[in-house]
Amino acid sequence: MTAFTGTGNLARLTVRRDRVLLPIWMLFMAVLPLSLASGTATLYKTDAERQGYIDDLGSSPLLLLFYGTKPADPNLGALIFWRAATGMVIMALIGVLFVIRHTRVEEEAGRRELLGATVVGRHAAVAAALLTMTVASLTVGVLVALGMISQDTPAAGAFAMGLAWAGAGILFAAVGAVTAQLSEGAGAARGIGVAVVGLSFGVRGAGDVAAGLSWLPWVSPLGWIYQVHAYTDNRWWIFGVVAVATLAGFALALRLSARRDVGAGLLPPRLGPAAAAPALSGPLALAWRLHRGSLYGWLVGLGIVGGLLFGGVAKTSADLLADNEQLRQILERIGGTSGAADVFLAGTLGIGAIAVAAYGIAAALRMRTEEAALRSEALLATGVSRLRWAASHLVFAFLGPTAVMLVTGLAAGLCYGATTGDVGRAVPRVLAGALVQLPAVWVLAALTVAVFGLAPRRAPAVGWAALSVCVVLGQIGAALQLSQVLLDVSPFTHIPRVPGGTVTVAPLLILTALTVALVLAGLAGFRRRDVPVT
């Protein structure tokens, strides 16, 4: 038996476990640039129009931070590679989180030790996770390339773009494999991995924005991917650098794995106090300890940083919208029918709300994680009732997203008000636009709670599948001109478009009532079923 024995079997097991989520995110990532290309080709038909669009967007340092340096050629493919660059960041995040999910999470849950007792080599789990992510990323890359070719863009540029997207996922899958060896906790491993992606993005962005620092993106792994410059330079040699870095990361992960025990991490865990603090005396206090890290991350990441970006770009985007009636009409379907800035703010706050819904779903699924790990059983064996234990987590599943949207609205309102010189008027209007999204966010969290109570094994798949449907319908459905019947499936379709639109209370009340009904159904099911269900 070798260290890689059983890799193929574990890879098949990985695909089976993610047989719902894996195709969903692959399809979404493949459709994203295609939908953007289709809409852009309709709005900007000539090189002159596309060049004007590039110049308008490139005048904002905040947008350069996201998109990178402006393309040298205004052809459609180059514009889409530039505009869809954040898709490569998403691929990087997926790569990190996917590998950690199938390595460190398995060790933390004890399943890796059970597999280790069979004919499975020590490095098989890491190799299987990387193999699966590599195949999935390459599939996404091929689909992206074929989609771009269908828009009459050159095949060479299309495959350069597809390989760039695939390379981001594969390279950062290796990063995830390394970070999975460092900490014995999956949460800490995710935090380190996401921090590496964030640092790479920040270093690349600083080099693209700041004058005289054009060399800085070459220090960043994400910067290498951006520097492919598909449809203009088509720098194929960069993929050789990415391949070498990926193999080096894989080799480092294997070396680190060989130097630690199964279930342990290379970084020593911090010892806790000998006795619990008085504040840690109930299920709510314990839930706070479990949820606070992710809550802080969302408050800073989307609440403050995202809010400042939304507000800071609003005025520039308003000027761009004012010059393009077709683009304005499309965004009005997403964000309302008032002024250009209101259209932009309502649309971006809607997108932010969908992201916050992901946090709500993850917080609700923490109950499933605790149950599957058999920790909830120990608590419920004491004087803690099932409803009290569940309620401690529901506080963060519903009040957590509320806090994030509140901070997002305040940050965006203050930043937008500072650019317009009217903070007093901007803050309440933008804050209302953020808070009005909450009933739709709550519905997705409540759906997850309901499935957790009634069919706990299916809760993760149903929760994330529901979010994926909302993403596709809300952000791509308008561009694809889907029927209103399909669009109405998403709760976000029924949210008033604020600021700028008219607030209709009835949909908000209906969504809130649906939230209450789903939560009650979930709690009723949880009270009556067996615990734990693993």
Image: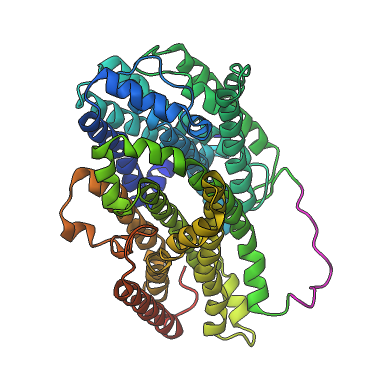
Residue 162 drawn at (x, y percent):
35, 26
Which secondary structure type mostly characterizes the magenta part of the structure? loop
Residue 89, horizontal then vertical, whole percent: 47, 36
Q: Is residue 368 placed above or below 68 in the rendered structure? A: below
State the residue at coordinates (58%, 19%): 218
Q: Quadrant of residue 131?
A: top left
What is the x, y in percent for residue 471?
33, 51
- Residue in the foreground of this view, choosing between 521 and 326: 326
In the displayed structure image, the side of residue 46 where residue 309 appears, left or right:
right
Range of residues picked out in magenta: 268-279
| Residue 531, magenta (yes or no) | no
Most distant residue in the right direction? 274
Q: Is residue 277 magenta?
A: yes
- Between 333 and 217, the one lying in front of the other is 333
Q: Would residue 27 appear left or right of 448 to someone viewing this image?
A: left
Q: Is residue 330 left or right of residue 85?
A: left
Residue 507, compared with residue 322, is above or below; it is below
- Marks counted in the figure total 0
Observer-nearest of 81 and 349 = 349
Q: Is residue 175 left or right of residue 510?
A: right
Q: Residue at x 67, y 51 (%)?
A: 184
The answer to whether any part of residue 299 appears in the image is yes
Residue 479 on image: x %, y %: 23, 43
Question: As displayed, is residue 495 above or below residue 47?
Answer: below
* Quarter occupied by residue 160: top left
